[in-house]
């Protein structure tokens, strides 16, 4: 049976033309957005990853690489436990001392699986983080019906803005793609309440927590602030504000099918379980180690008004000002968002005030959210509302609150996008519109790319490992445990990182460590007692009281950089008890120190010191009240040294005791010392101090001086017997 000719469907040429035009605009818009992202990668990211460069210094960048490599080895079965990395061995749960990269480690692992070495995989992971952030923000802004130029510019600011490039050493903050996607889900739920939007909100928020706990926490603050802003903008102030979100939640529940409700509840349970699984190791670490941030420490990294103007890495906007000099932890206060978004916002507000360009409710909600979070975290003359937030369980682990700026970039990108759209649609002369847009976009690109970012190089990373590996002895014990001594004339953390990376490459545990927190008693001095002190403290912490465990571990230790050590310093387990308050003055007076000898190893002077306790009580090595007993050493001119000169101020060097000094017992300890400032001849003097209490030599203990003398010349240190 055939249809009459007049009933046969014939395509409408005009409909096809409209569909083709829409498709063309869609493709053209995304081509423009993609091109903008490529420009950002070329101008902002590429200069810091080409020619063997790696963003960041030799500290945190290498630590992030270590954690990513640990995740890769765990995923591929080379490491048995994710949370128990083999650094700070044998302390447990060391990955939970800092961020874990669980949410983005797969990116790094894929790069390793396709043949990239550690350094190139890290660089690729770093670049792809920018790609993910740009794509997520651009998608979100397009879903919010912004024009392609507005969406591309907003995504450019979010992905490549000044606050995020200032955090290049803190690469754990790079992956923020969950922020715009979670915000999109919240906005969509507010516009059309559906349970699926809440499921999406939970999904992106949980994933963001897995990428970075810092960013996940700040995202929650942003979601709360934006939700409050929407309630204020979208409802009558008062009762309507309070009912704004409950009414939408109730409507979403009523409008869902039985299967939809069940899926929502199941998803909620899964998300809750995932968060519990993520936070439990951190909660256990807090319980075991007592890690916490004091309010005084948190306060140093709360934003000040000056923080929002500081951009030390910017070629355009770096300028001297006394207000910046007063900022504590200045490197953490780089929070200037740039002139481009401020300029666009100012133009849009002027146009809106003159009714030439509508701004819309999302503009007001984003602006309110920014204001709420700035006021919540602001520090003014010793006061901050955030102090009440910091008392909540778990929140005091978040130390660097200034890093909230990398999350605030999203609502600011919303303001930028809406401002550019407002300018584009404003009832003003076309050349003026184009000129304003061009000025904002060009300024955005220039100020984001004109940065002086700190970089290290792949060759530096690899050379440090080669140098450390070259120091390994030929004969190694079974299942070695590595300890790498601190280096000379460089920060101690560099060799700690050398140690953990070298051990990781070889599949060994190591006493070295580096992280956002440090286990009790871990202070490597370069003295021969470091390994014994570290293992003894760890075993005490774990409740393993016998000497057999110490002896078993001691046989496996490979000490690198500890030349000329007396084996007796590592022959017995050290005991490190904790005490509270001041020691009795009588016990201090019954203590004796003696310098048994001096030696020079690799340009560093070591003094071997014997501490004898003639009292009836132990001198503990640790303090629960922040007043530990520590050894102090200094140089004096050898000629005509008087007791009064020995007591003069200048006892600055401090070294923790490797272990307790038992009653009627002794402790031998090695003290590394920097070269003397004067050529000499000099002698070394040694005393003891209880920090915050007093000097032992003021309580009756004689100050010890070396029999050997030290001279300093152009070719180094020399000992004179």
Image (cartoon, grey):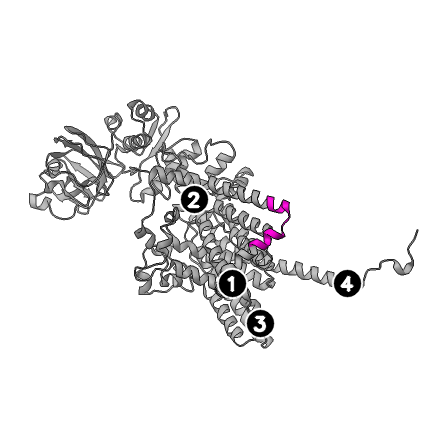
Q: Earlier in the sequence, mark 1 or mark 4?
A: 4
Q: Are marks 4 and 3 in contact (CB under 8 Å)?
A: no
Between circles 4 and 3, the one closer to the viewer is 4
Q: Earlier in the sequence, mark 2 or mark 1?
A: 2
Q: Which residues are magenta?
A: 249-262
Q: Which quarter shows the C terminus?
A: top left
Instruction: Please identify the quarter of the rendering in which residue 301 is found.
Output: bottom left
Report helix, strand or loop for mark 1.
helix
Mark nearer the N terminus (3 vs 2)? 2
Distance of mark 3 from mark 2, alpha carbons? 44 Å
Position of residue 605 measured from the top left corner of the image (x, y, whole percent): 22, 38
Q: Secondary structure at mark 3?
A: helix
Mark 2 surroundings: few (<14), some (14-19) or many (≥20) residues within 10 A: many
Dot label at residue 240:
1
Of labels 3 and 2, the one closer to you = 2
Place of residue 584 in the rendered image (x, y in percent of width and height, measured from the top left): 13, 38
**Residues under labels 2 and 4: Cα distance?**
54 Å
* Camera-side mark, 2 or 1: 1
Q: Residue, x 54% and y 45% (percent of image)? A: 268
Tag 4 residue:
15
- Residue corresponding to mark 3: 434
């Amino acid at each position: 049976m055939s249809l009459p000719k007049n009933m046969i469907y014939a395509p409408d040429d005009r409909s096809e033309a409209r569909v083709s035009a829409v498709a063309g605009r869609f493709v053209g818009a995304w081509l423009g957005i993609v091109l903008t992202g490529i420009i950002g990668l070329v101008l902002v990211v590429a200069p810091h990853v080409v020619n063997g460069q790696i963003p960041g210094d030799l500290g945190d960048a290498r630590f992030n690489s270590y954690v990513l490599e640990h995740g890769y080895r765990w995923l591929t079965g080379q490491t048995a436990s994710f949370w128990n990395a083999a650094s700070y061995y044998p302390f447990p749960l060391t990955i939970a001392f800092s961020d874990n990269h669980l949410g983005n480690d797969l990116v790094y692992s894929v790069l390793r699986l396709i043949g990239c070495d550690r350094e190139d995989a890290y660089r690729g992971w770093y670049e792809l983080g920018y790609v993910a952030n740009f794509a997520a923000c651009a998608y979100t802004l397009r879903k919010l019906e912004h024009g392609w130029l507005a969406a591309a510019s907003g995504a450019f600011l979010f992905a490549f803005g000044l606050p995020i490039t200032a955090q290049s050493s803190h690469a754990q903050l790079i992956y923020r793609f969950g922020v715009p996607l979670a915000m999109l889900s919240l906005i969509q739920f507010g516009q059309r309440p559906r349970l699926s939007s809440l499921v999406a909100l939970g999904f992106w928020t949980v994933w963001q927590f897995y990428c970075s706990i810092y960013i996940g926490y700040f995202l929650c603050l942003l979601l709360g602030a934006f939700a409050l802003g929407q309630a204020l903008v979208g409802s009558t102030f008062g009762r309507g504000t309070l009912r704004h979100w409950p009414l939408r939640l109730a409507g979403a529940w009523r409008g869902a099918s039985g299967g939809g409700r069940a899926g929502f509840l199941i998803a909620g349970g899964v998300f809750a379980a995932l968060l519990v699984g993520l936070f439990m190791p951190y909660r256990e670490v807090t319980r075991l180690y007592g890690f916490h941030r004091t309010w005084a420490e948190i306060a140093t990294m709360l934003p000040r008004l000056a923080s929002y103007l500081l951009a030390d890495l910017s070629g355009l906007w770096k300028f001297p000002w006394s207000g910046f000099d007063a900022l504590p932890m200045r490197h953490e206060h780089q929070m200037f968002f740039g002139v481009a978004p401020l300029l666009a916002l100012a133009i849009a507000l002027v146009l809106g005030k003159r009714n030439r360009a509508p701004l819309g409710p999302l503009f007001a909600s984003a602006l309110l959210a920014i204001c709420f979070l700035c006021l919540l975290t602001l520090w003014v003359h010793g006061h901050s509302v955030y102090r009440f937030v910091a008392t909540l369980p778990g929140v005091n682990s978040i130390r660097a609150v200034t890093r909230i700026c990398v999350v605030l970039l999203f609502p600011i990108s919303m303001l930028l996008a809406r401002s550019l759209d407002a300018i584009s649609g404003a009832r003003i002369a076309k050349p003026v519109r184009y000129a304003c847009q061009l000025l904002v976009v060009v300024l955005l690109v220039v100020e984001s790319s004109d940065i002086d970012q700190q970089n290290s190089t792949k060759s530096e990373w690899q050379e440090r490992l080669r140098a450390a590996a070259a120091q390994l002895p030929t004969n190694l014990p079974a299942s070695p445990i590595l300890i790498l001594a601190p280096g000379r004339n460089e920060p101690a953390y560099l060799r700690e990182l050398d140690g953990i990376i070298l051990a990781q490459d070889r599949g060994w545990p190591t006493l070295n460590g580096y992280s956002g927190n440090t286990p009790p008693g871990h202070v490597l001095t370069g003295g021969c007692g470091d390994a014994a002190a570290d293992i003894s403290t760890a075993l005490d912490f774990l409740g393993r009281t016998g000497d057999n465990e110490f002896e078993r571990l001691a046989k496996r230790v490979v000490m690198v950089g500890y030349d000329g050590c007396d084996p007796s310093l590592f022959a017995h387990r050290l005991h490190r008890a904790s005490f509270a308050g001041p020691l009795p003055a009588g016990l201090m007076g019954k203590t004796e120190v003696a310098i048994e000898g001096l030696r020079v190893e690799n340009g560093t002077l070591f003094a071997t010191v014997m501490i004898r306790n003639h009292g009836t009580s132990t001198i503990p090595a640790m303090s629960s009240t922040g007043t530990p007993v520590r050894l102090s050493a200094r140089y004096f001119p050898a000629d005509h040294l008087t007791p009064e000169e020995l007591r003069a101020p200048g006892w600055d060097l401090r070294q923790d005791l490797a272990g307790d000094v038992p009653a009627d017992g002794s402790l031998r300890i090695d003290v590394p010392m920097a070269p003397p400032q004067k050529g000499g001849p000099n002698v070394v003097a040694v005393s003891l101090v209880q920090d915050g209490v007093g000097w032992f030599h003021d309580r009756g203990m004689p100050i010890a001086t070396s029999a050997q003398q030290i001279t300093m010349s152009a070719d180094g240190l020399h000992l004179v017997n």
